[in-house]
Image: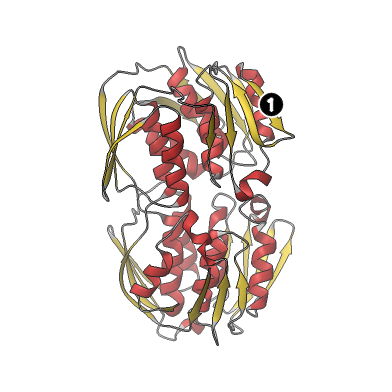
Amino acid sequence: MTVTIQPSAVSGIISAPTSKSSMQRACAAALLNKGKTIIENPGKSNDDLAALEVIQLLGATIASAADNYITVDSNGVQPSGSEINCGESGLGIRMFAPIAALSQNPIRINGTGSLLTRPMNFFDDIFPQLDIAIQSNNGKLPIEITGPLQPKDITIDGSLSSQFLTGLLMAYGNAASESVTIKVTGLKSKPYIDLTLQVMHHFGYDVVNNNYESFVVNPVRNETGKLIKYTVEGDWSGGAFLLVAGAVAGKITVEGLDTHSTQADKAILKALIDCGSSISIQEKQIEIGLPATGSSGLKAFHFDASDCPDLFPPLVALAAYCNGTTAIEGVRRLAHKESNRGLTLQEEFGKMGIKITLQDDLMLIEGGHGVHGASVYSHHDHRIAMACAVAGLKARGVTTIKDAEAIDKSYPGFYQHLRQLGAAVN
């Protein structure tokens, strides 16, 4: 699918999309809950739908569903087949693999698209320590595992992704018969672990966080027949693109973002403040618009995205309209996303007249010289497509995005939301 973005001013009120980070964790917790779970404000992205399919294959039943809630019945992990597919969700594969290993049934775990090329060596290293037999494709998908997982005191490397730790914490919480400790070295994306712990505590698990260096998982009585309600948060990752659109192309109000959220991408607020955007942060809504001097009044900023690498694309779109050279740290976190995002951002924004330099762990964006429309390519990466669309709102000329449907992975309503704000998106 190809989408065109005409230079447009945006205005109005819009609700942020549902957080797939929160939704997928809620799905996993609902599977592990031996009873009924009502998930309110459910997500409908491709990653969310993949998570719902996985939990059904692992034993859960979707008892009822509507636009504003889903009811899940489960008696724990009881696979109905021999294979699960996590789609293109990195969180899905890293979280559900340890959970699937709670069963003694052999299970093949697969994915699609870019997920097939992303490294999964972690499982080869860790699963045998937990009595899980594993066969992998040289550290890539598909993998075949046979449990059941036996929680033990272990040390893991958290430098590639915190998502592996999320899966282990959830599996341990379900299986631990005595206190066990997971030690972590070099943990990245700590706010995402805060979100995992928040969901686990909501579902009754007892996990102690020792300064992100170790996590003690205490046994809990998994009562049968519990009814748990969980409301999925609004998504700061997708909301960041809306906020940047307001900062560079008009004045909008974004509703549905919890300013007390543990989501890592809430840090977009710091960048928006530091660059001089006109922003009013309230408990239930955020108003953002151009400064009095227009987008040319935005100034370059310095930002450390090591714990929130998904912010790189909207930050680059913002930096393109900021006078001076913006510096963003954390480039090493970008190599194993849906695309190699450092190189992809450099290539696609280069087509729009924005020079990006990569220096080790640093990205330098030379902004304020004018963005021009161009034909760009998403590289099958949802966040690249959204970043180019936002940048195109104030570009000179038309921006054409090829493979624009990549947004369905996380934010299928993105283009429609831009249209609702008055953008000319075709």
Q: Is residue 82 above or below residue 377?
A: above
**Mark 1 element type:** strand
Question: Viewer-proximal residue, 22 or 35?
Answer: 35
**Residue shown at 63%/27% (left/top)?**
144
What color scheme is it? secondary structure
Question: Viewer-proximal residue, 169 or 293?
Answer: 169
Q: Which residue is mark 1?
A: 135
Question: Viewer-proximal residue, 10 or 423?
Answer: 423
Q: Residues within 10 Å of mark 1 (few under 14, many from 20)?
A: some
Question: Viewer-proximal residue, 309 or 383?
Answer: 383
Q: Quadrant of residue 284?
A: bottom left
From the viewer's perspective, tell me whether residue 70 is left or right of residue 29: left
**Residue shown at 66%/32% (left/top)?**
122
- Is any atom of residue 369 visible in this view? yes
Q: Is residue 291 above or below residue 409?
A: below
Q: Position of residue 28 (x, y in %)?
A: 42, 34
Of the 4 image quadrants, the one containing the C terminus is bottom left
Q: Position of residue 75 (x, y in %)?
A: 35, 22
Q: Position of residue 8 (x, y in %)?
A: 43, 83
Q: Is residue 307 above or below residue 31?
A: below
- Is any atom of residue 211 visible in this view? no
From the viewer's perspective, tell me whether residue 379 is left or right of residue 227: right
How many labels were placed on the picture? 1
Q: Tell me the amino acid under the disc marked 1.
A: Gln
Q: Quadrant of residue 419?
A: bottom left
